[in-house]
Image (cartoon, rainbow, N blue to C red):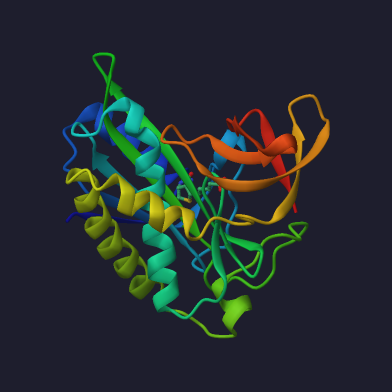
């Protein structure tokens, strides 16, 4: 496995994207940095992180074996791998808030940004960006953010956490190659935040409604049990879970 270590960069995802447009990048190449000047989050948001306190890295993953319709399994593999790794560091009450926020004690300690590399109109690879708040203790104006250190009171070695996450990613991508979809979905749904609990959501028109999260579909939609015992599926733009 190649690991490219950078002191600072705009974004490790952008770095790998640029690299792959210029040269052939090997499967599982990792770019990691101490600091990002333009860290990016989901849905066009920013991802900010103090210098040298947290993990910010991206993994270039060849996915030519995975069908486009199975794309969400990549997300599930990544979330499950992070949860398994952080569990080993005794981080309590770990959950994944659909689709891929990593929570501990109901606070966000990590995020995932997966971007596809398109070549000749096909997805040839995914760039999997992972940010985990490890030793940072101050999060200005982010009341729902936390870190492994704030949760456990311990200081962590960033490299140790990185290597365990990479090991779990390798193991779980092997499951995906073997098409073990049931095992992957179980690992994800077993940690799904607010599963089977009464929850409030906001729909795309701003209306609030309540329901019980039951799981996710193969395409990554959230399945919610709403009134009259009906299970409705929502995509990311259609619903926000309020908590
Ligand atoms: C989210 O919004 O929750 C996703 C955050 C993903 C952040 C990581 S940090 C490393 C990689 N590079 C980026 O610019 N973003 C991802």
Image position of 155 (left or right of 126): right
Nearer to us in this view, 165 or 81:
81
- Residue furthest out toward the top: 121
Residue 146 locus on image (x, y percent): 64, 67
Image position of 202 (left or right of 155): right
Which residue appears at 78% of the width and 57% of the height? 141
* Quadrant assignment for the C terminus: bottom right
Image position of 104 (left or right of 156): right
The quadrant holding residue 69 is: top left
The quadrant holding residue 225 is: top right
- When the figure is inspected, residue 178 is found, relative to residue 131, above or below; the finding is above
* Quadrant assignment for the N terminus: bottom left
Residue 7 seen from this side: no
Question: How many numbered badges does the structure rendering display?
Answer: 0
Residue 203 locus on image (x, y percent): 74, 31
- Residue furthest out toward the right: 207
Which residue appears at 54% of the width and 55% of the height? 192
Which residue appears at 44% of the width and 64% of the height? 83
Which residue appears at 66% of the width and 64% of the height? 106
Residue 168 locus on image (x, y percent): 29, 63
Nearer to us in this view, 18 or 78:
78
Residue 138 seen from this side: yes
């Amino acid at each position: 496995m190649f690991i490219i270590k950078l002191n600072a960069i705009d974004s490790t995802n952008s770095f790998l994207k640029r690299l792959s447009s210029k040269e052939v990048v090997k499967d599982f190449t990792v770019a990691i940095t101490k600091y990002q000047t333009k860290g990016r989050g989901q849905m066009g948001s920013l991802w900010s992180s103090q210098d040298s306190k947290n993990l910010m890295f991206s993994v270039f993953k060849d996915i030519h074996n995975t069908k486009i319709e199975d794309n969400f399994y990549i997300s599930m593999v990544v979330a499950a791998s992070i949860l398994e790794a952080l569990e080993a560091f005794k981080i309590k009450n770990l959950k994944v808030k659909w689709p891929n926020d990593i929570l501990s004690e109901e606070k966000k300690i990590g995020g995932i940004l997966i971007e596809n590399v398109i070549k000749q109109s096909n997805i040839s690879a995914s760039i999997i960006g992972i940010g985990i708040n490890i030793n940072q203790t101050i999060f200005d104006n982010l009341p729902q953010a936390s870190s492994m250190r704030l949760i456990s009171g311990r200081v962590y070695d960033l490299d140790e956490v990185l290597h365990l996450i990479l090991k779990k990613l390798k193991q779980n991508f092997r499951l995906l190659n073997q098409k073990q979809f049931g095992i992957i979905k179980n690992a994800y749904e077993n940690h799904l935040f607010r599963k089977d609990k009464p929850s409030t959501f906001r729909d795309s028109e701003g209306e609030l409604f309540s329901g019980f999260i039951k799981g996710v579909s193969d395409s990554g939609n959230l399945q919610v049990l709403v009134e009259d015992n009906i299970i409705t599926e929502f995509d990311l733009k259609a619903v926000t879970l309020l908590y």
